[in-house]
Each structure stands twice: as C-alpha cells, then as structure tokens.
Amino acid sequence: MTDIPPREPWPQLLPVPRSALLVWLNLAVALTVAAIGLGVGFAQGIKAQLVILYTVISVAVLLWLLNYVTTIFESRSAASAAPSDARGVWRANRVMIIAMVALLIVYLLVTASVPAFRSVTNFIAFLVLEAILLFAFKVSGRFATGRSAFIGIMVLVALVVISSFTIEGFLSGSNVKAILLFAAFLGIACIGQTLVALMGGLDLSIPFVIGSANVGMLFLTTLGVPSFVAFGFVLILGGLIGLLNGVLSYKLQGQALILTLGMGFAVAGLTQILTSIGSSFAGNVFGTVPSWLSNLAAMNGRTFGLAFPPTILIWIVLAVIVIIGLRYSAYGRYVYALGGNRRSARLVGVSEFRYWTLAYVLSGVFAALTGCLLLGWSGGGFIGVGDPYLFTTLAAVVIGGTSLLGGAGGYGFTVIGVLVLQVLTSFLLGIGLRYEWQQFIFGLLILPMVALYGRSPHIRATV
Amino acid sequence: MAERASSSSTYLLVPILLIAVLLGTAVIRGPNLVSLSGFGSAIIVAAPLILATYALMALAVAGRGTVDLAMGPLVAFINVSVVKLNMLGIISGPFGTFLVALGLGVLYQLAFALIVIWVRVQPIIVALSGFLALTGINLVILPRPGGMAPEFMSSWGLGTTIFSPVLLILVIATGGWLLFTLTPFYANLRMMGYDERAAWTSGVRINIVRVGAHVIAGLFAGLAALCYTALIASGDPSQGTNLTLTAVTALVLGGVSLAGGRGGVTGALLGALNLWLIGYVLATFNFGAIQAFVTQMSYGIILVLSLLLTLLVPVLSRHISFISPWSAFVVLGAVVAAIMLHVATADTYLPSEAVPATAQGPLLDRYFLTAPAGGAEPGFVLSPIQRMAFFAALAAVVLTFAARLTQAEAPARRMGLFLYLFVAALVLALFALIAMQGEVTLFSGGTP
C-alpha cells in the first residue's frame, strides 16, 4: 500500500520507449501479429483492400498499446527492486504460480478424461487463460489506478479471442449487434447503479422499476395516451421513485440496499395493481408498442439508415456524457468527494443530501428508460422483464471495479464490466450452456475478479 | 431513570406492538387460526421463515453489514439436494437427512466466512456471488419443482397438530440460541458486531468469532431447509429469491440492526411471525386476482416503514424508557390471548351471552376462570354482584401487578426467569386449551 510511486504526468500522445531494443521488440511483435492476421484474412477470402486496411490499423493500434505499456514499465522499473533469489521469487509469486498450476492440472484432467475436449481451440483457450493469469498478476500490479479496468479489458479480449475460435459465427455482424444491444440495455440500467455505488449506496429497486416502466408504458399507450407523453411520464415517474428512494434512504445509508429493495417491491406491486384493475388478465398487459419505440430497440431497428438499433447509439452517447460528466463536472467531482470521505466533503460545503438524492433520481430515470427500451425490444409488457437485472447491474459495477464502499471507480469501468458480462453470456450460450449454468459461472466469476483488486485492508491496518 | 440499560431492548417494543395488533386482527378476521390445525399449520408454514430469519440474524449481529442475500437460495439448495439425494436413494433416514442438510448449510457458511476473512472482500459481494451461483446450481440439480421428500417427513407437513417435530425444531433452535447468549462467545460476537476494531484491539479473536457466527447461521439455514422440505414435501428450486426477501424483511421488522451488534432471537422470531401474520391477514381479505400483488406491495411498504421506524428507536427509547418491552409483551400477549379465547370459545361456551367490550384484565380473567369451569359443573355459584366484585378486584390486582412489573422490569437487560415461565405457561395453557376443545371448534363450532 505504501510503495505506490508518485503519480507521473500524463504520458504523451505518442509514447516511445527510451531503450531502442524495446522499440524494435514492440515493432517485431506488432508486425508478427499483423502478418498472422494478413495470412488468416487472405485464407478466409476477404477482399484484399479490406485485409490491407485491417492490417495497417492493427499494426498501428498494437504498436501504440505496446509502446504505452512499455513506457509505463520503464518509468516504474526503478521503483521495484524485487529480491531475485529463488525463495523471494516464490514468495512474491506464489498465488499466481498456484493458480496457474491449478489451471494446468484442471486442463490436463479434463483433457485426459473427456475425449471430446481434445481440440486445438481448447488448447488455445487454455493458453489464453494462463496468459490472462500471468498478466493479471504481473502487469496489473504496475498500474496504480485503473487496475481493474486493465484486468477487465484483458478478460474481455481473451473472451473474444476464445469465443471467436470456439464458436462459429461469433464475430458475425448480427451476433456482435446482439451483444451490443443487450450490453446497451444493461449499460443504461447500470448508469444509476454506478452513480449510487460511487456514493457508497446501492439501488436494488432497479429491476422492479424496469419491470414497472415496461408494463406501465404499454398500459398508458393502450389507454390512448400519446406515446411520447407516456414515455416522458414514465421517465418522470421513475425519477420520482428514485427521489423517494434517495430521500428515505438518506438517513439509513447503511441499509440503502434493503430499503431500495422494499421500495422496489412496493412499486412493482402497485404497478401491477393499477394496471390490472378492471382487467381480467391480472398481471398481463396487452397492446401494441408504438413503432418508433420498437425501431429504437428491436434487433432490426435502423439508426439514420444504418442497420443497427439506435439504443446502441443512445448508450454510447449516454456513456460518453456520464464519463465526461463524472470526470470534469462539479457534480461528478462532488460525487467522488462524498464517496471518498463524507466528513471532509461536508466540511468543504458539499450538500450530501442533494447529491445522494440526485444519484438515486438518476438511477430511477435510467431504470425507467431501460424498461421502456426493453418494451420496444420485446414488443410486450411483462413485469418480470427486469428480474435478471437485480444482480447483473451490481455484478457489472463490481466486475468493472467500482468500489461498493464509494469513492473509487467510474462509469468507464462499468462499461467494461457490462461488456465482459455480455460477451461471457454470449460465449456461454454459444457453447451450449443453459441459463442456470451461466448464472452459476457468473456467481463464481465475481469473487476472483473482485479479489484481484477490491480487497479491504486488514484490520491491523485500520486501527 | 434507567436510561442506559433500558435502551438495549427498547427496539423490541415496535415488533411487540405490531404483533399484538396483527394477531388480534388475524384472529378476528380468520377465526380458523385458533384451532388445533390452525396453529399447527401456522407453525409449519412459518417455521422456514423463522429459521431463515434466525440465520440472517446471527450473521447480522456479526457486523460488517453482513446480510446474506443468498440465504433463500441456500435454503432452496439444501432442499433440492436433500430431495435429489432421496430420489437417488442415497439418503432416506432422519440421520442422513439431518447430516446432509446441516452439513451443507455449515459448509457453505464456512466458505463464506473464510472468504470474508482471508480474501477480505466485502460480505455483500460474497453474498451476491453466492446468490447467483446457488440460484443457478439449484436449477441444475432440480430443473422444476417436484420430487419427493424423505419418507419420515411425510407426517411433518400435515399441520393437524401443534406438537409436531417442526415445533420441536423451532423450540430447540430458539432455546439453543438463548443458551448461546449466556456464553462469553456471544458477548464477543456482539462486541465484534458493534465495533470490530475495538474488539480486535481488546484481544477478541475476531476471525474465530466470525467463523462461529457463520457456523451457527449455517445450522439455522439447514434447519430452515428441513422445515421447508417438510412443508412442501418436495423440492422447489425457484422460491429462493422470495424467501430471501421475506426473511430480510422479517429481520428488519424484528428490530435487528443490519449494522451489527444489536439483535436477538426474540426480535427475529417476532419479525418473522409478524411477516407471516401480515400474509395471513391479507389473505383473509379477498382481493381476487390481484391478491399476490397486494401482498407484494404490502411487504415492500412494510419493509420500508419498519426501516424508517428504526430511526425512531432512539427517540422512542428516550421517552418511554420506563416501559419494559418484556412486560409490554406479557400484557399485550394477555390481551391477544383473551381475544383468541373469545373467538375460539364464543360458539361453544357462551352461545347466548353477549360479551361486553371490557378492559383487558377482566376479559382475560373471565376466560381463565370459565375455561376450567367449562365442563358445566354447577357447584360453584356466585351471585351477579359477587361475580362483578370478584372480577373487579381481580382485574385491579392484575393491572396493578402488570404496571408494577412493567416499571420494575424496565431496566432489565433480558427477560427475567419469572417472565419466561409466565409466558411459557401462558402459551402452554393456550395450546392445551385449544387441544382440549379443538374438535369442537373444528367440526361443530367452526361450521355453523
């Protein structure tokens, strides 16, 4: 904890390592990878211009990344003078070595016992996993901040590599579009969760608000309310629920989790009561979804004539706004200040109540937005549509690396977490695992991800 | 007066008051409750919730904001495991079933504790992880509700008698915790929950204490799963989330502090009973198709309100510190018992006599007097004036006694032995009374 080197100035736009050897090494790696890509591209029979374009782009990006990483290493290598004898090496790396050996044993066991498992793709997958472990332990330690983001990106890249090897058509246009679309739903729902988590709270009412917005929106349009008015009304209602959440939980910040859960229950129940009065099909709402809404979120939606649903664009725009807003606006800085240290923030004159409540309001609004968008996607109202989001929003935030204690993290991290979850879902679906196995794996995945970067200090260090 | 000491259990006043109101309403709305099968099924239905709440309570007392959201899925996991193992023919006897159920609960909670201690991630993340993993694996073990509970459990879930094995489990669990509170280990546990750093610096081995709390929670979870299996007589992988939500609500309703250090088996028991009673009362109103939604909404609102009420506890305890929650419990319990007895016996003993709406004392005394005399023995005759005077005197004595007790017991940290005995005698008398005339209420009184 104490040996974090002082933060150096932001690296220049075009980083170049000081030693010439490293420059050549980077160049060689980049060119080798590009050559492999070139070969594969021609072997697949893609147009020559496209292959050349991709090759050039990949060389440039890879070179930049490699240089960036090596410059960071160079500037920090002086700080770490690790003991070099065998025992020191073992002591410094035992967790990693144990993990890698365990993975090797598991791989060998499975390979030996299951004949269908013996394939080249699985071997590659195994190597990639080992590489991830190595990177996660050795490289991520060099980053003072954004360690979780680095691990997240590593996992993401590895997942994409493994999936594209293992699954036919994983990188096809429609699959990528589907992944992005679902990531957009989850991502929009996660905006509020991230904001709230940054302040040290949690919002478990999100899934219920999503379901209620989903049903309520369809109900209102079926009543004859103009769809845009209904849309705005639902968003405002979502905000009001968020306001209630924020105001009520302000004095009960330790129990915000439970309080929002209760609110969610109440909201979902109330919505169902309201929408099923006078209807013989209690709990179900039938109606037609306005066409602009289905275009917004359905798989075959079009954005300005381009063949992807606008929801993805909305998510990207929102993500950029939130990331920039958190980084540069007064609101964003105060959120971090409050999450980091309540007392000092209050002494500086930041109104805790205002920001706490505002975070919950935003959470409610974005949950309602997700509910409306999901209505456009599915074409029918269903109160349970938000149920998968009860814990996936939390999981995405946690995997991304935002601390649930507040003050550390950001929406950019959550975006990575969302993508990891979504690509993993797609991968698991692709290899034919059922939903319950996916859930099981998600559950087991969260712990090691968090354990890599989200550990609390030992009590010895807090006294 | 005795402000320091009385604040320790004043939080129980709210659930006590609530349970009196709810029980009164429940009995009036649904008189079937006061019968052999009514109480029997009530115990069977409420037992899993009560035990799951105990488990959550043990964890909540340990502090660090440990609310094991995976409690419901854990209970469901043990349930489907037991059922699956039974279907495969691996376990069938009581011994094996108990071993598997308690063992699974303890193993899971042990893993939870070790992860919290060694990996040092927040408990909420472990709980989240466990929730997802267990919910998934439950569906793998048993894709849809079904299967058979072990053979020996078949009579447990009938609910025709009060003194079923489920009640025994409940009593053992409750008594076990109460005995546990006498040990120094419990004092350490509470201290750790209240202020972990202070506990550590004063030499408490907090790791061992935490492991202990989790093991106890695991035992409770195993028992809850057994009761749940007995209740539904099959396996159901899908009810975990609901159980988590209701158990957490019950926990909060029972005044257990989620921040740690405050809570007890009494609060958890009252909370779980309250929650079950809310469901019961709501079920007596016929909402038709939206019944489930009304229940859901009420649970949510009650959870929020009871959380807000915990804010009022410090204020309340400053103003009403002279009231001992235990004595309040006894007095209100007497009132409710009077209402129950009235409902249960209105048809059989007093078919014509209009019951005057009198104060609590006389009502209680009347039935305690008339019940033994219910065998229609005419030897003991009093004139109306004598009877009035007798009742009035007795009521005065009871009221004085209750008031005196309320004040005297106010500074007590826990219920005195006398009150324990008194409550136990009261409950036993009630059960016995109902058992004695249960058939009457069931077959002739219940069906006019």
Image: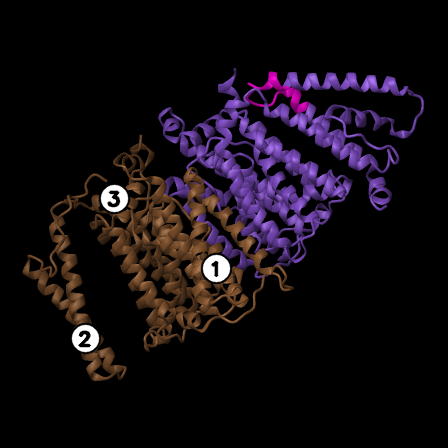
Chain colours: A brown, B purple
What is the quadrant of the N terminus of chain A in the image?
top left
Task: Write down the chain letter for disc 3.
Answer: A
Q: Which mark is residue A91?
A: 3
Q: Is residue B201 left or right of residue B274?
A: left
Q: Is residue B285 left or right of residue A150?
A: right
Q: Is residue B399 above or below residue B170?
A: above
Task: Write down the chain letter for disc 2.
Answer: A
Extent of the magenta region: B406-421
**Looking at the picture, how far across and down is residue B39, in whole percent?**
73, 40
Tag 1 secondary structure: helix
Q: Mark 2 = which residue?
A: A55
Tag 2 secondary structure: helix
Q: Residues within 10 Å of mark 2 (few under 14, many from 20)?
A: many
- Residue at the outermost right position: B378
Q: Which mark is residue A313?
A: none
Residue mark closest to the camera, 1 vs 3: 1
**Looking at the picture, how far across and down is residue A193, in whole percent?**
38, 52
Residues at discs 1 and 3 both on one chain: yes
Residue nearer the viewer, A22 or A328: A328
